[in-house]
Amino acid sequence: MSEQADQRTQPTDEERVEMLETMLRIREFESRMRDNFADAEIPGFLHLYIGQEAMATGVCQVLEDRDYLTSTHRGHGHCIARGLDTARMAAEIYGKETGYCNGKGGSMHIADVEAGMLGANGIVAGGVPIATGAALSSKMRGTDQVAVAFFGDGALSEGAFHESFNQAAIWDLPLIGIVENNQYGEMSGIDEQHPPSTHDDLTIYGEPYGAHREQVDGMDVEAVYDAAARAVERARHGEGPSLVECVGYRFEGHHEGDSEFYRDDGEYEHWKSKDPVETYPERLIDEGVLTADEWAAMQAGVETELDEAIEFARESPMPDPQQAYEGLYADGGDHR
């Protein structure tokens, strides 16, 4: 069984409203990217975060600006939750020079080191060693910064995960692993990827390394906030790594164009009833934290922001081919 807390960490009402707006921004950004990809405006592949908004939002709400995180091929949600600018993100996805990586990274490789976003990664578990390195840096410099690695359940089968958590355990590093269990690794369900003993609790993969373990409802942003706050507190106090499994669902395919042949009948409807972007505003309105008018204004504000972000991306220039070799080397030199 995963370890459970005796007392729940509650976000303030202000934080609750902020988390709702973040989830809404992620959902609308992703929906716009989906539609524009279908219209052939966006090159390459597109892997959407729709349905998993509560996971990134709940975790990033408890982080400080000085903390680090690494992401996955499905990383737009993590970037937005971290506070990255939607206009520059859109430009990157469009392959434009004004994007975070000057259009070189595209959808799967957005990074902003100055914001502590050490990069999305198309390699399964590829961000875990990077976050472990950041956690080691924090310990060596004597700071209390923490490093969070977001990854899917498929990463638990990769050596990079085990090597990283083994090292983090040996050195008591402030590393937090967030397992985003969206029920599928690409097109394979949990039961096809992991042994039966782990199906109900994937945090068991952290047990050999003595990691603090929790499993939470990944469709409940406050449950995620609670578990993340506890993991961050442990990390800041030198109590070693944590592994938090957020159980949820992705409403889109593995990538845009996926036929989704692998889904069971009724599965989507079951999870859609838990959709955090639909259930959370109702909850806040019912509890008097937010009015219906304020919710409508929030939606309008996000719509305007994204209209401007997409227009910025469309009007931005393509990168000059001569820039292809820039940014490849730490010393800034030309090694062609």
Image (cartoon, rainbow, N blue to C red):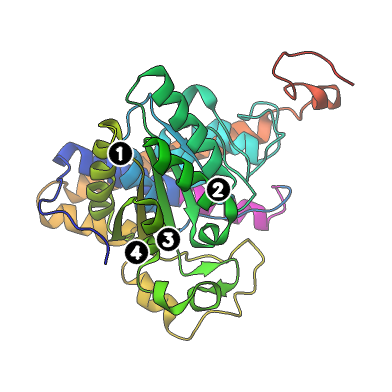
Q: Is residue 280 above or below residue 230?
A: below
Q: Does 174 sit left or right of 132 as displayed?
A: left
Q: Give the number of the disc on residue 275.
A: 4
Q: Earlier in the sequence, mark 4 or mark 3?
A: 3
Alpha-carbon span between mark 4 and mark 1? 19 Å
Alpha-carbon span between mark 4 and mark 3? 28 Å
Q: Which residue is mark 1?
A: 61
Q: Earlier in the sequence, mark 4 or mark 1?
A: 1
Q: Earlier in the sequence, mark 1 or mark 2?
A: 1
Give how far across and how far down residue 21 sits, in percent: 32, 43
Q: Secondary structure at mark 4?
A: loop
Q: Secondary structure at mark 2?
A: loop
Q: Quadrant of residue 328?
A: top right
Name the amino acid, label 2.
Answer: Thr
Q: Which residue is mark 3?
A: 205
Are the residues at dot 4 and dot 3 in contact (C-beta closer than 8 Å)? no
Name the amino acid, label 3.
Answer: Tyr
x 46%, y 47%: residue: 165
- In magenta segment, residue 32: yes
Alpha-carbon span between mark 1 and mark 2? 19 Å
Residue 308, visible in the rendered structure: no
Q: Secondary structure at mark 1?
A: helix
Q: Quadrant of the C terminus?
A: top right
Q: Nearer the viewer, residue 20 or 81?
A: 81
Q: Which residues are magenta?
A: 28-42
Alpha-carbon span between mark 3 and mark 2? 19 Å
Alpha-carbon span between mark 4 and mark 2? 22 Å
Name the amino acid, label 4.
Answer: Asp
- Packing grade of label 3 (10 A; few <14, some 14-19, many >=20) is some
